[in-house]
Image (tube, rainbow, N blue to C red):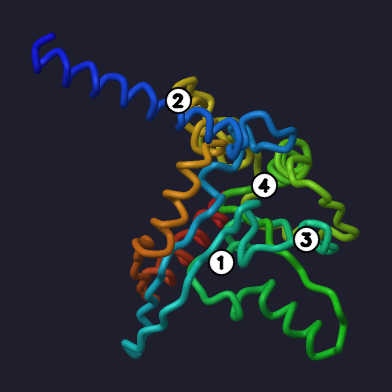
Amino acid sequence: MSLVKKYSFILFSNLIIFFILIIFCEIIFGYWFKQNNFGIYMRSERNKIIKYSRIQYNNEKIDFIYKRNFYGFIGEEFNPKDVKIIFEGGSTGAEIWKPREKSIVGVLNQLLINDNISKKIYNASTNGKSIRGYAYDFKHWFKKIPNFNPEYVIFYLGINDRSFPDDEIHRFYDRQHSTETIKKIRDYIKNNSFFLEKIKKIENKYFPKNTIIYEKKLLTNYIKTLIILIIQ
């Protein structure tokens, strides 16, 4: 056997062993065959960290982190059995443009603490979601979370509920998954892969996405939205 064939055989054999080990680890540690795997749902809203820098009118900069945990909720990781109150809303409930303690849910939780009430509100808001999306959440999202039995649900209704457009963009915000086959396959793999989950955690820890928000731009967007609502 020539050296080229010998080393080619060794390389090929090692690659086969490597891929077998990957598949074995995925089967054991991944979520592929677990009853509560997320399937194609909520892929873009899970295990998410974005660092924001908000530039105020006086040029003061406020740095904060927008985080969505393993289960897709805004904030830190939690034990699902501890969740008794959830908050459902759209972008006005998610409030990705401000620190958590300044958000609606953050303020409400602080009021509970001030009144010595041992309850906490967990934020399930996602951008663009309407009442239709709330129904989808219970059908496709919450039932995937083990030991998840909230006693109270706060629905924050607003701009997204003025109508129910049936185009693909608006339906995506409610369904939280794509209708394209190739994207469904992508989302299913990313949601269930053990190794991709670990890579995502490393990325979030050492290479988080950075975004700058200008307060003047936020105000301009609010005014545009208000004008649209008045016209309609």
Between circles 2 and 3, the one closer to the viewer is: 2
Disc 1 vs disc 2: Cβ atoms closer than 8 Å? no
Q: Is residue 212 left or right of residue 70?
A: left
Q: Is residue 185 left or right of residue 149?
A: left
Label 2 element class = helix
- The quadrant holding residue 74 is bottom right
Residue at image mark 3: 86
User: Where is residue 199 drawn, in percent x and y?
Assistant: 42, 49
The amino acid marked with disc number 1 is: Glu
Label 4 element class = loop
Q: Is residue 180 above or below residue 125?
A: above
Between circles 1 and 4, the one closer to the viewer is: 1
- Residues 36 and 225: in front is 36
Residue occupying the point 61% across, 53% down: 70
Residue at image mark 2: 20
Residue at image mark 1: 95
Q: Of marks 2 and 4, which one's residue comes earlier in the chain?
A: 2
Q: Of marks 4 and 3, which one's residue comes earlier in the chain?
A: 3
